[in-house]
Image (spheres, rainbow, N blue to C red):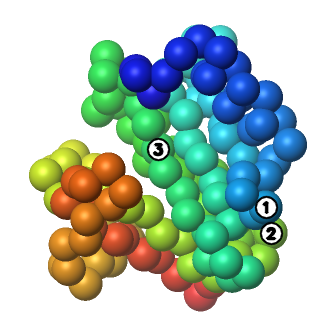
Amino acid sequence: MPDASIEEVRRIIESWKTKTFEGKYFEMFALTVNDAVVGSISLYGRADKIASIGAEIFPDERGKGYAVEGLKLVMEKAKGMGYLLAQDQVRADNAASIALHEKLGFETDGYVYKNAKGRDVLIYSKCLIG
C-alpha cells in the first residue's frame, strides 16, 4: 500500500485484528524466516465455501519457495475451516505468480478480467477436497 498514509495503514492493521473485512472472515498471516518477515498471505472468506487467498513476498525474498509453503499452509487452514474452493486473482502479466499457482494445482479458464484497479487479471481456482 505505497500510497496509503501511516494513519490509514494503522487503521487497516487494527481492522485485521477483528478477523473480519466487509462482514466476512479475513485473516492476514506474516511469513517469517529466522524471525524476519519475508512476506504475507491473506485468507478471505469470499462465500460460505469459497476462500480467496493471496501471497505477497518481498522482492528480495522471491524465488526461495516461501510463497509455495505459505500458500500450502493457508490452504490447509481454509480446508479445516470448511472451505471447499480456494481462489486467487493473478495479474495476467505476472509470469512468476502464474507459474506458482499452476505448480500448486490451481487452474484458470484463461478469461482476462479487469480488477478494481483496472488491471488485467486471471482468476485461479483450486478444489481443497479430494
For mark 3, does the 10 Å Cα neighbourhood hold few (<14), some (14 to 19), or many (20 or more) residues? many
* Residue in the image at 59% along x and 87% along y: 130
**Residue 13 in view, yes or no:** yes
Dot 1: element: loop
Q: What residue did someone put label 3 on?
A: 55
* Residue in the image at 19% along x and 79% along y: 110
Give the x, y percent position of residue 95.
16, 51
Mark carried by residue 70: none
Give the x, y percent position of residue 94.
19, 48
The mark total stands at 3
Image vertical order of residue 20 relative to residue 78, above or below: above
Query: Label 2 vs label 1: CA separation?
Result: 17 Å
| Residue reaching furthest to the right | 18
Image vertical order of residue 10 relative to residue 89, above or below: above
Q: Are marks 1 and 3 in contact (CB under 8 Å)?
A: no
* Residue in the image at 62% along x and 77% along y: 50
Image vertical order of residue 125 relative to residue 21, above or below: below
Q: In the image, 81: left or right of 116?
A: right
Q: In the image, 62: left or right of 86?
A: left
Residue nearest the observer in this picture, 98 or 111:
111
Dot 2: element: loop
Please report whichever mark, 1 or 3, sits nearer to the chain's N-terminal start.
1
For mark 2, does the 10 Å Cα neighbourhood hold few (<14), some (14 to 19), or many (20 or more) residues? few
Mark carried by residue 23: 1
Q: What residue did someone put label 2 on?
A: 81
Query: Of the residues shown, which amino acid type is indicated by label 1?
Result: Gly
Query: Of the residues shown, which amino acid type is indicated by label 3?
Result: Ala
Give the x, y percent position of residue 61.
36, 22
Q: In the image, 49: left or right of 121?
A: right
Q: In the image, 80: left or right of 93?
A: right
Give the x, y percent position of residue 19.
81, 47
Query: Of the residues shown, which amino acid type is indicated by label 2?
Result: Met
